[in-house]
């Protein structure tokens, strides 16, 4: 977790998945409780159990509602993962990992967290780590390619956080982060990453899958639909499944960036540049966690367990409109990609129940919501409060020297 990336440039991946403790879902009374039961087998004796419970309850101190959709959408449950401080599911991994890292970092050491973000990761990581002593954060995001609300969340001035608007794409930002680990520019500084290349984010993300099970009390095994980009969220779900959580299958719902669905359908691994879409946190040309999935599952197991789907921007808008008209539910564009994939599976006769992970709050994407359903979503207080806070950001070309020189 402290290293972020393995010395050979690869991703740390568990050699074995510790099985879920017996009776977990009967014993646990909250998501923090689930964390306290599961995390010790992943972290060993350090940090110790009582602290893990405290870390989880401190990090995951917000509601995780499972909303059953009515009418034509009966059997579809939306797991709302956007009630944390930065209003996306990234808060789960980032807040828990920040506390774990802060706990295990030796007192005399300093750590710099590098994070590339196409929207939501950056603010969750900045919020999660800000104020932890001996840790600072360098955020890189593609200039002009995140929504106005996302940008405000990224650049709000926070203790120990340096935000850079990089003149390039998200893939450029991600390349810079990977490069920094072996660069002269950052030599002598202890670096880690808080992208989903860090296993420390994925382990806590298993918890909300189990929370959905605990709350939903499903009698039939659900299919879980994951709006996907870098495939970190899906990999966490697959880890929970390999640990013993039953699923009928997963749906990897992607936007026009179709690397993974293409691989699942024909084995094609051609790398393509990312394309900008309405669900911008999923605009990833080459998902970094693909490597991990491939390590965890053989290709035939992967195809058996996971179905891929692609949803265009037009279909995303139509999905937001359809779900709103049918049920009154307002979905953000990422969640709408997932809901559309589910609708297709229902039409194909795959029986429910379905769980769709709602990855962001609709108020993060007011203009797209307005375009789809004709009015702006209500703004939660966490966003309104940001309007009055000072901001701090530097524009840089996509090279490490410009970044290392300033941070
Ligand atoms: C990051 C993000 C995704 C994609 O998650 P991955 O783990 O990268 O697949 C989907 N939706 C939202 C809102 C996100 O912020």
Image (spheres, rainbow, N blue to C red):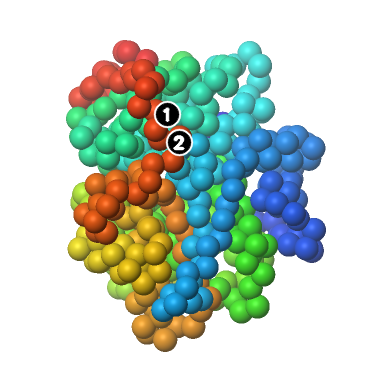
Q: Residue furthest bottom?
A: 349
Badge 1 residue CB within 8 Å of ligand 1: no
Q: Which mark is residue 295?
A: none
**Nearest to the observer: residue 78 or residue 142:** 78
Q: Is residue 250 visible?
A: no
Q: Residue at x 45, y 83 (%)?
A: 350
Separation of disc 1 and disc 2 at Cα?
Answer: 6 Å
Residue at left offset 63%, top offset 13% = 108
Q: Quadrant of residue 316?
A: bottom left
Image quarter of the N terminus: top right
Residue 144 location, x and y as percent? 20, 35
The residue identified by callout 1 is 385
Q: Residue 74 or 283: which is nearer the viewer?
A: 74
Q: Secondary structure at mark 2?
A: helix
- Location of residue 93 with respect to 372 vertically, above or below: above
Seen in the picture, residue 335 relative to 148 is either above or below; the reply is below
Eyeballing the image, is 363 above or below 238? above
Give neighbour class at mark 1: few <14, some 14-19, many 20+ (Cα, 10 Å): few
Q: Is residue 318 visible?
A: yes
216 displayed left or right of 159 = right
User: Can you give x and y, in whole percent of width and height, for residue 4 in the image?
Assistant: 50, 35
> Is the residue marked 2 within 8 Å of ligand 1, measured from its CB?
no
Q: Is residue 241 left or right of residue 269?
A: right
Task: State yes or no: discs 1 and 2 in contact (Cβ < 8 Å).
Answer: yes
Instruction: Describe the element under mark 1 as helix, strand or loop.
Output: helix
Q: Residue 260 placed where, x, y %?
A: 34, 62
Quadrant location of the C terminus in the rendered image:
top left
Rendering quarter of residue 319: bottom left
Local crowd size for mark 2, using a 10 Å CA cut-off: few (<14), some (14–19), many (≥20): few
Write down the residue under mark 2.
381
């Amino acid at each position: 977790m402290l290293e972020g990336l393995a010395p050979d440039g690869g991703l740390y991946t568990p050699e074995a998945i510790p099985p879920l403790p017996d009776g977990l879902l009967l014993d646990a009374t909250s998501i923090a409780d689930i964390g306290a039961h599961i995390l010790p087998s992943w972290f060993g004796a350090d940090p110790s159990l009582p602290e893990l419970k405290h870390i989880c309850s401190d990090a995951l101190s917000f509601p995780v509602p499972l909303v059953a959709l009515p009418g034509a959408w009966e059997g579809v449950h939306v797991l709302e993962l956007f009630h944390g401080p930065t209003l996306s599911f990234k808060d789960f991994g980032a807040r828990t990992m920040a506390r774990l890292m802060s706990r295990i970092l030796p007192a005399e050491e300093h750590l710099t967290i590098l994070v590339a973000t196409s929207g939501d990761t950056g603010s969750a990581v900045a919020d999660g780590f800000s104020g932890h002593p001996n840790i600072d954060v360098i955020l890189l995001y593609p200039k002009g390619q995140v929504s106005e609300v996302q940008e405000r969340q990224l650049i709000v001035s926070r203790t120990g956080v340096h935000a850079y608007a990089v003149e390039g794409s998200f893939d450029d930002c991600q390349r810079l982060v990977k490069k920094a680990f072996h660069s002269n520019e950052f030599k002598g500084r202890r670096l880690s990453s808080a992208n989903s290349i860090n296993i420390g984010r994925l382990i806590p993300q298993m918890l909300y899958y189990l929370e959905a099970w605990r709350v939903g009390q499903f009698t039939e095994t659900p299919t879980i639909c994951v709006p996907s980009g870098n495939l970190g969220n899906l990999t966490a779900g697959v880890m929970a499944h390999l640990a013993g959580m039953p699923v009928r299958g997963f749906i990897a719902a992607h936007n026009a960036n179709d690397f993974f669905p293409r691989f699942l359908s024909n084995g094609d691994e051609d790398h393509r540049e990312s394309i900008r879409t309405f669900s911008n946190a999923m605009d990833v040309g080459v998902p970094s966690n693909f490597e991990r999935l491939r390590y965890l599952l053989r290709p035939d197991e992967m195809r058996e367990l996971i179905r891929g789907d692609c949803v265009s921007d037009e279909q995303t808008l139509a999905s937001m409109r359809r779900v709103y008209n049918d049920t009154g539910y307002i979905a953000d564009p990422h969640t709408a990609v997932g809901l559309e994939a589910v609708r297709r599976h229902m039409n194909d006769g795959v029986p429910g129940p379905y769980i769709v992970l709602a990855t962001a709050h609709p108020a993060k994407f007011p203009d797209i919501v307005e375009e789809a359903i004709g009015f702006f979503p209500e703004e939660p207080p966490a966003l309104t409060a940001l309007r009055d806070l000072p901001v701090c950001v530097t524009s840089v070309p996509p090279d490490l020297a410009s970044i290392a020189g300033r941070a």
